[in-house]
Structures are given as C-alpha cells and as structure tokens.
Amino acid sequence: MIRASGLRKSYPGFDLRVADLRVPEGSFITMLGPSGAGKSTLLRLLAGMEAAQDGVLERRGRAVYLDQDNIVLERNVIDNAVFGLRLMGVASAEARRRLRPWLARVGLAERLRQPAAKLSGGERARLALVRALATEPDVLLLDEPTQSLDPKNVAMVEALLREAHTRGRSVVLVTHNLHQARRLGEETWLLLDGRIVEQAPTETFFASPRSREAKAYLAGEMVY
Amino acid sequence: MDVPLGEIWEIAWRSLRIAGAATFLAALFGLPLGVWLGARPRRGGGSARVVLYAAMGLPPVVVGLFFYLLLSRSGPLGKSGLLFTQTAMVMAEAVLAFPMIAGFTAAGVRARAANVRRLVRGLGGSEKQVLTTLLWESRRPIVAALAAGFGSAISEVGAATITGGDIRHHTRVLTTAVVLETRKGELRSALMLGLVLLGLTLLVTAVLVVWGERE
C-alpha cells in the first residue's frame, strides 16, 4: 500500500504537485497522460527512487520499479533473471531454481546461457518482468512495459500482470495505450502538467469522464 | 647481433617490472578516481574529466623533464638520490599511465551508471549494491583502462631516458635499448628488441582481456 499527500518535485521547466493519492493493497491502477506530464517522475517518487522536495509518502511492503527501457546487465539470461533475488541475498543455486519455471513460462528456458543483450525487445521485456516478479514484491510500479512490443508479447506481459494482481500484488501501470488501460485497470489516473486531473474507477473514467481535460484527452484532442 | 640474447631477456624483464609497477601505482589512485567520477549520481565532475582527458596527451619528455628537475642534485628532492634509478622511471611512467586509467575508467563507468542505478534501485537494492554491480558491469572498460595504462608505460621512451639515463644492466629498458641500437646502426638488435616489446605488450593485454571477459 502506498499513500502520499502534498508531494512536490520541481526542476527547471517542470513542477509535479500531487495533493493526495492512494495505491490500496491489491489494486490495479493505470496511469495515463501525455509525454512530459510527470508520470515517470511520480512513479519514481512512489518507488522511493527519487526524493520529493515536499510532502509525505507512506509505503507499506516492498515496491519494485520497472523502467521502460527493460534494462539488462552485461550477463547471460539466467544471471540477469536471478539478479533481483540475488540483490535480496538469495543464494545463487536457490535463485536459479526459483527462476527456471518463470523463464520456461515466458519462452526463455532454452536461452539461459545466451547474452541478454542479444534478446529482442519483447524478450527483454519478459525477462525484466519475471526478474521483478520472482522477487515477490507487494507493489509493482511499471513504466510503459509494453511500449514498442508486438501484440503477442503485449498479451504475454499483460497475462503476467493479471496473474500478479490476482495473487494480491498492487500494480501501478503507466501506459499510453488507452485500450490497455481500460483492459487492465480498476482505477485510472490522468496526469497533466504535473497534476492528477482525474482519478476514477476505470469504467467510470472511460464511460463518463468528469473533467474537461479527461474528456479532451480521451477524445484525442491536444490538451497540453 | 650486438645485444646478447640473455641481455635482451634481462632488459625485457626489467621493462615488464618497471611498467607493471607504474601501472599498479597509477591504478591505485586512478581506478578509485575514475570510479568516483563515473559513478557520481549527480551531474558534475566535468572539469575533472576534461583535465584527465587532456592529461592523456601529456608529452612524456615534459613529464621526464619535470622529474629530472625534481630529482636532480639541485632539485627539491635531490638528496633522495633517485635520479637515474628504476624508482624514478616508475614514478614518471605512473604519472603518464594515471590519466589513461582514471579517464577510461570514468568514461566506462559513466556509460553504465544511470542504467545500473535505475535497475538496482528499482529492484529495491541499496546504494552499496549499485556500486558493486556497477564495478562488475564496468569490468571490461576497467580492464581496457589498465591495458591502456600498461601500454603507455611500457612503450614510453622520453621520460624513461631522462629519468633512468639508459644505464646498462640498471635502467636500460626495451624502448631505450631500441633507440640506442638504432643510433648505433645495429638494426637487427633494434628489430629484435622491438619485436620483444610488441610481444610483451600483446601478451599482457591478452592476459588482461581474458581475465576481464570472464563471466
């Protein structure tokens, strides 16, 4: 669970202010907004990777943040996959044992010894996701994990996210894909110029948005 | 051939020891500085990097002259008696290898720092884990930096001549011996010494690269 109030993060040309937000246990939140709205910054603040200049942030449980670049280390697939568990102090053999079913599930079982840098974008996305999921976090903070993936890989990533959610994990997913936000989210936030301008149950958000900005955003009009 | 085979190996062994010691000394200070400059989470350190990169082009003869003035009888460290010794050569070569090691290390670490920090911190790791992961991920550029430092030390001739004096059985190294034999017109000896120098550089670099490529 994450709760924040009065969060502020500013740097030249940008000012993020979040009056109040809550990521309840077991929730699935999709975050929308144009590029530069502050989605990634907010996600990093929630993950504790950046410090807010003002405000209160309360986080219960372990949160992991997944970057949109699906970063891999200069190691082979299995060593990348176990990296999250190794950071937590899990022994190498045990971490490998735990990861094998995950890697088999995302179609990487045959490529364990291959350098991760040689994987395709979709494979890297799957690897990054199972690396995080294997650590059994309480909250998943995901920054456009399916950007530039083909439909098959998107479906595979979404299936993993749904399963994690079913198992009680909270998920905050940043996406530019309105269909994906609607498919997966229970609650949707719209961020604009560093402010959350609409925060509503996903069905309500898409069916009857309240704010002028949300209506314009969903209509595909330029609101920034 | 003017230089007996036994003496060639003696010179080669001396070159290896002096260049190795200089590389070790330069790495002792250059690696931590390079890692620190490259791993800084905030922007900055630009001036230090500019100075380091510029120092990669330090003229060896100027470095040699500096140590000559420092260690000569009338210099501030004249009483140390270090001029025309292997120690003086190590010091001068270390100064030449230092910017190579620090500069290449900083560039290699810097290229990886942002991604490694985002990954490790994103997975809940500590700043200490960021640093250890960054060091391991930067092993290849660090090895390249060490190889470049060693290469600059062992192939150096100007500073070695000025600080060592090219004294037979004492401070003569492969580069200074090549110059001497060429001047004497003993081109076969010069060529032989040059080949040994090339082989030695290749061998040490190969050992470093194989070591750095380990998974």
Image (cartoon, rainbow, N blue to C red):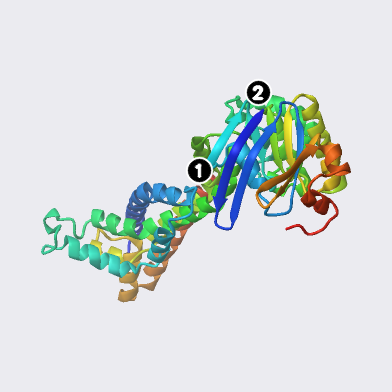
Mark 1, residues whose alpha carbon is within 10 Å: few (<14), some, or many (≥20)? many
The answer to whether one can see residue A118 in this image is yes
Relative depth, front residue between A209 and B122: A209
The residue shown at (29%, 55%) is B90
Please check whether the numbered discs 1 and 2 fall on a single chain.
no
Which amino acid, mark 1? Leu
The residue wearing badge 2 is: A94
Mark 2, residues whose alpha carbon is within 10 Å: few (<14), some, or many (≥20)? few
Residue A223, position as x, y percentages in the image = 76, 57
Give the quadrant of residue A102: top right
- The chain under label 2 reads A
Residue B20, position as x, y percentages in the image = 37, 51
Q: Quadrant of the C terminus of chain A?
A: bottom right
- The chain under label 1 reads B
Cα gap from disc 1 to disc 2, whole angstroms = 24 Å
> Residue A176, relative to residue B174: is it above or below?
above
The residue wearing badge 1 is: B135
Q: Quadrant of the N terminus of chain A?
A: top right
Relative to residue A191, is residue B30 drawn left or right?
left
Give the quadrant of residue A29: top right
Give the quadrant of residue A47: top right
Please, what secondary structure does the residue beneath circle 1 have? helix
Residue B93, position as x, y percentages in the image = 32, 58
The residue shown at (78%, 24%) is A167
Please, what secondary structure does the residue beneath circle 2 have? helix
Relative depth, front residue between B106 and A16: A16
Relative depth, front residue between B154 and A29: A29
Residue A134, position as x, y percentages in the image = 70, 29
The residue shown at (74%, 50%) is A33
> Residue A98, relative to residue B12: is it above or below?
above
The answer to whether one can see residue B215 in this image is no
